């Protein structure tokens, strides 16, 4: 309501897929191809907030990112349109140092380390932190010392980098990445049907897009 009040006509949400109080115009499920749906069970037995089939009934598109190692595409079948993509380094990436010590506080840090290896980096150390971790000065100092001992650069994800203070960011490199679509028309294929609905439906106060990972 506040976003609409302030003039927003398009609201893009990171998550919110399971929030029934928000009526979404378009819902996209992003699946990590290396992890799939985990063990397929709902919390606390597994990582899911609801069954996969229940979620697929409400989504408009599924994006499988990376190699589909768990046959997600086969499992979904015709239940929802599927698009393929992979993570690649952004042109903004300027780091030329190839020996690094890496740390990450994301849902699956190993994915970040795999990306570094795939890009030709020599990962001399790996340090996992909880998702959304707030880094202390002591932790950052220790990581920088370890990197210095290994004669390596300290690198992290863009998501982690923005959670660091300005002083903590010194001597730490963020690896910017972007999504590369297998089908370059994927975005149009996802967006066009809902834009047609929007054009002919005068009841839209704002467009709400939920992206659930």
Image: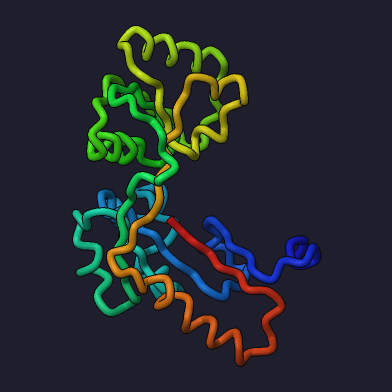
Q: Position of residue 133 (x, y in %)?
A: 52, 31
User: What residue lies at 26% left-to-right and 30% top-to-bottom?
Assistant: 121
Q: Position of residue 7 (x, y in %)?
A: 77, 67
- In this view, the residue farthest toward the bottom is 200
Residue 86 appearing in the image? yes
User: What residue lies at 35% left-to-right and 48% top-to-bottom?
Assistant: 45
| Number of dots carrying numbers | 0
In which quarter of the view is residue 60 placed?
bottom left
In which quarter of the view is residue 209 placed?
bottom right
Relative vertical location of residue 21 with respect to residue 70 in this rendering, above or below: below
Relative vertical location of residue 78 with respect to residue 179 in this rendering, above or below: below
Q: Position of residue 166 (x, y in %)?
A: 62, 25
User: What residue lies at 58% left-to-right and 62% top-to-bottom?
Assistant: 12
- In this view, the residue farthest toward the right is 5
Residue 54 appearing in the image? no
Q: Quadrant of the N terminus?
A: bottom right
Q: Is residue 1 left or right of residue 177?
A: right
Q: Position of residue 185 (x, y in %)?
A: 36, 73
User: What residue lies at 46% left-to-right and 59% top-to-bottom?
Assistant: 212
Q: Is residue 102 left or right of residue 6?
A: left
Front residue (pair 92, 34): 92
In which quarter of the view is residue 66 placed?
bottom left
Relative vertical location of residue 86 with respect to residue 118 in this rendering, above or below: below
Q: Quadrant of the C terminus?
A: bottom left
């Amino acid at each position: 309501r506040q976003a609409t009040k302030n003039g927003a006509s398009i609201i893009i949400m990171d998550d919110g897929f399971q929030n029934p109080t928000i009526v979404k115009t378009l819902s996209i499920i992003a699946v990590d191809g290396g992890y799939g749906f985990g063990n397929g069970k709902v919390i606390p037995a597994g990582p899911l907030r609801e069954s996969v089939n229940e979620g697929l009934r409400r989504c408009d598109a599924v994006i499988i990112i990376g190699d589909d190692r768990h046959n997600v595409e086969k499992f979904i079948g015709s239940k929802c349109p599927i698009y393929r993509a992979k993570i690649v380094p952004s042109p903004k990436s300027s780091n030329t140092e190839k020996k690094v010590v890496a740390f990450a506080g994301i849902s699956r840090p190993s994915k970040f380390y795999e990306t570094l290896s795939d890009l030709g980096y020599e990962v001399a150390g790996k340090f996992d932190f909880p998702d959304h971790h707030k880094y202390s000065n002591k932790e950052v100092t220790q990581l920088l010392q370890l990197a210095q001992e290994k004669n390596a650069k300290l690198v992290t994800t863009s998501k982690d980098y923005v959670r660091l203070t300005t002083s903590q960011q010194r001597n730490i490199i963020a690896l910017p990445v972007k999504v590369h679509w297998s089908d370059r028309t994927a975005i149009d294929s996802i967006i066009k049907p809902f834009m047609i609905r929007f054009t002919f439906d005068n009841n839209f106060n704002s467009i709400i897009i939920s992206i659930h990972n």
